[in-house]
Amino acid sequence: MVKPVIDRQREHQANERTFLAWLRTSIALIGFGIAIARFGLFLRQIQVVVTQKPVATNSFFTSENLGVSLVIFGIIVICLAAWRYNQVFWQIERGDYRPNRLLVWIIAGVVAILGSLSIPLVLWRDSSIAPPIDDSKLQSKSRRQALK
């Protein structure tokens, strides 16, 4: 009986493409984390400028914490991707590849949880934001300043 020739080069290339896909995913997580953290800080600073009052924030549930969580998770995904790539590499070499879906489910679950945590931050509106500006008061104030 003739053993089929295994095209290990294709298997290794597929493994590498999978690793690179995980790498892109982790870079996206890190990028989103930085954007969410910085944009939340920007919005808070704008609110301080508009209202001229300090902004009360929840000390735990902030966009900065969500952003940092995404960055940390992105770094963890890079480490897991490298570990999985190496594991699959040696399984291909030994000829005993076994797919593992547990890692996929864990990462999908964490991303879903972090994504769900962003919903309240997107929908949250502060009732202490300054009321609409009365144009007549603004015009009279600018006239007084011009006369000085």
Image (tube, rainbow, N blue to C red):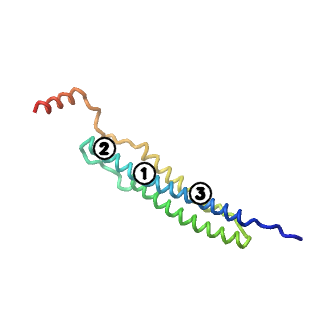
Q: Are marks 1 and 3 in contact (CB under 8 Å)?
A: no
Q: Secondary structure at mark 3?
A: helix
Q: Position of residue 102 (x, y in %)?
A: 63, 62
Viewed as shown, does residue 110 lie left or right of 94? left
Q: What residue occupies the far bottom of the structure in this picture?
A: 94
Q: Position of residue 100 (x, y in %)?
A: 66, 63
Q: Secondary structure at mark 2?
A: helix
Q: What residue occupies the far left of the structure in this picture?
A: 148
Q: Amino acid at mark 3?
A: Ala
Residue at the spot 56% in from the left edge and 56% down from the top edge: 109
Viewed as shown, does residue 84 lie left or right of 63? right
What is the distance, in whole Å, between disc 1 and disc 3 at their CAs? 21 Å
Label 1: which residue? 35
Residue at the spot 43% in from the left edge and 42% down from the top edge: 123
Q: Earlier in the sequence, mark 1 or mark 3?
A: 3
Which of the two discs, 1 and 2, sits closer to the camera? 1
Q: Secondary structure at mark 1?
A: helix
> Relative to residue 72, is residue 122 depicted above or below?
above
Which of the two discs, 3 and 2, sits closer to the camera? 3
Q: Quadrant of residue 8?
A: bottom right
Which of the two discs, 1 and 3, sits closer to the camera? 3
Mark 2 surroundings: few (<14), some (14-19) or many (≥20) residues within 10 A: some
Label placed on residue 21: 3
Mark 1 surroundings: few (<14), some (14-19) or many (≥20) residues within 10 A: some
Q: Amino acid at mark 1?
A: Ala
